[in-house]
Amino acid sequence: MKIYLAGFMSGEFLEETTAWRKKIRNHYKMKDWPIVWLDPYNGKDVATITKDGLKSAIPAQAIIHRDWMSVNHADVLVVNLNTFGSGRTSTGTICEMAWAWQLRKPIIMITDDEQYINHPFTSYFASFIYPTIDAMLEDKAIDYLYKGTVNAIYE
């Protein structure tokens, strides 16, 4: 199974924007399941991402094309809409949700922001909505999608 970890990117909030992705990957390392993690930070020269997260050494078109490929190849998206206190919106992440919806990919949305929880587009796109990463891990949304599509696993 391939899971794309979509969410806010920023040079200013680099630690926060990578920590949640690492937390999910580390959680599933213990299960030893063959999950491929697709992450928009993979392969990027993180040091060149600007403070506002809108530019890097990679051309914008290449970023968009590669992220489209990641969404297209993913079986599931985990979408974190937290902006970690930034005033910038998650425009790229919303675009990735729309691509996923068009491709009929399940989306696990992480947000405690009422504007996303109650918005007809974002709430309709999501198969699951959780306020935190911990809540998602505790509820085992990824486990549910994995077990239903990979192999029969009885625990």
Image (cartoon, rainbow, N blue to C red):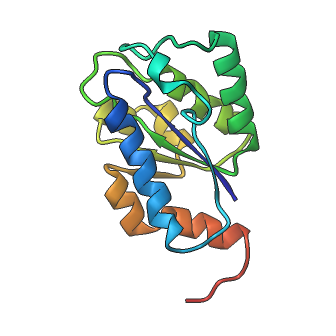
Q: Residue furthest bottom?
A: 155
Q: Residue shown at 66%/37% (left/top)?
A: 100
Depicted 82 relative to depicted 65: above or below: below
Q: Residue shown at 36%/30% (left/top)?
A: 14
Of 33 and 117, nearer the camera is 33
Residue 89, x across and y down, in percent:
39, 19
Depicted 57 relative to depicted 81: above or below: above
The number of discs equals 0
Residue 126, x across and y down, in percent:
52, 45
Task: Work out whether residue 25 can be spotted.
Answer: yes
Task: Work out whether residue 118 can be spotted.
Answer: no
Q: Quadrant of the C terminus?
A: bottom right
Q: Residue furthest left?
A: 85
Q: Quadrant of the N terminus?
A: bottom right
Residue 57, x across and y down, in percent:
57, 12
Residue 34, x across and y down, in percent:
68, 66
Of 107 and 64, nearer the camera is 64
Q: Residue shown at 30%/35% (left/top)?
A: 113
Of 92 and 16, nearer the camera is 16
Q: Residue shown at 40%/54% (left/top)?
A: 23
Q: Is residue 19 left or right of residue 21?
A: left
Q: Is residue 109 left or right of residue 71?
A: left
